[in-house]
Image (cartoon, rainbow, N blue to C red):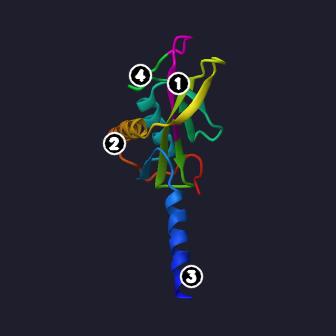
Amino acid sequence: MNWMKKLGVLCAGLYLVGCQTSGYMIEESNYSVKQHRIAITQAMGPINTVSANGRELTSVYHDRSLKNIEVTPKVKERYYTKAIILGPRRPYRVSVVVKAEERDPDTGRFMEVGIEEDLSRRRALSILQMLNQSPAPSGIFDEEMPF
């Protein structure tokens, strides 16, 4: 019976290790949702899409150096950043993921090829820097859930 217990612990450990998220996570940020949106917009530049609740922001396309690009037929690869503000109340977590896309030579369409961990970390650090430059978190209520 003892070996079954060890096997169960091993399986549970492997399962939990496999559940790690990709990209970069800013943990326990005590700023309001509005301050997060402002910092994300300042760090990423122009925003392409915003979710209905305003917590999921996607950047315009950029290159490997995180400079915005205009997608032309000559462009072979492009990247975009997705930042998601997580949690029902403070402290929030912010997930930052930079996804890479390459143009398929046969169809001419872009296909997602993966997540760029290093670019995700760089983008998250720039968001964190913008958060740290914003005014200190106040004791005011978040506009979404005042009670």
Earlier in the chain: of badge 1 and badge 2, it is 1
Earlier in the chain: of badge 2 and badge 4, it is 4
Do callouts 3 and 1 mark residues in contact (Cβ within 8 Å)?
Answer: no
Earlier in the chain: of badge 4 and badge 3, it is 3
- Residue occupied by mark 3: 4
Query: At numbered mark 1, what does the secondary structure look like: helix, strand or loop?
Result: loop
Query: At numbered mark 3, what does the secondary structure look like: helix, strand or loop?
Result: helix
Cα distance in 3D space between marks 1 and 2: 24 Å
Position of 131 with respect to 32 (left or right) is left
Q: Is residue 71 magenta?
A: yes
Position of 89 with respect to 127 (left or right) is right
Q: Position of residue 107 (x, y in %)?
A: 66, 18
Q: Position of residue 100 (x, y in %)?
A: 51, 31
Q: Nearer the viewer, mark 2 or mark 4?
A: 4
Cα distance in 3D space between marks 2 and 4: 22 Å
Earlier in the chain: of badge 3 and badge 2, it is 3
Cα distance in 3D space between marks 3 and 2: 49 Å
Q: Nearer the viewer, mark 1 or mark 2?
A: 1
Residue at horizontal 63 percent and vertical 17 percent from the top: 108
Q: Residues within 10 Å of mark 2 (few under 14, many from 20)?
A: some
Cα distance in 3D space between marks 4 and 1: 10 Å
* Residue 12 visible in the shown view: yes
- Residue occupied by mark 4: 67
User: Label 1 amino acid?
Assistant: Val
Query: At numbered mark 4, what does the secondary structure look like: helix, strand or loop?
Result: loop
Label ID, residue 60: 1
Query: At numbered mark 2, what does the secondary structure look like: helix, strand or loop?
Result: helix
Q: Position of residue 104 (x, y in %)?
A: 60, 22
Label ID, residue 132: 2
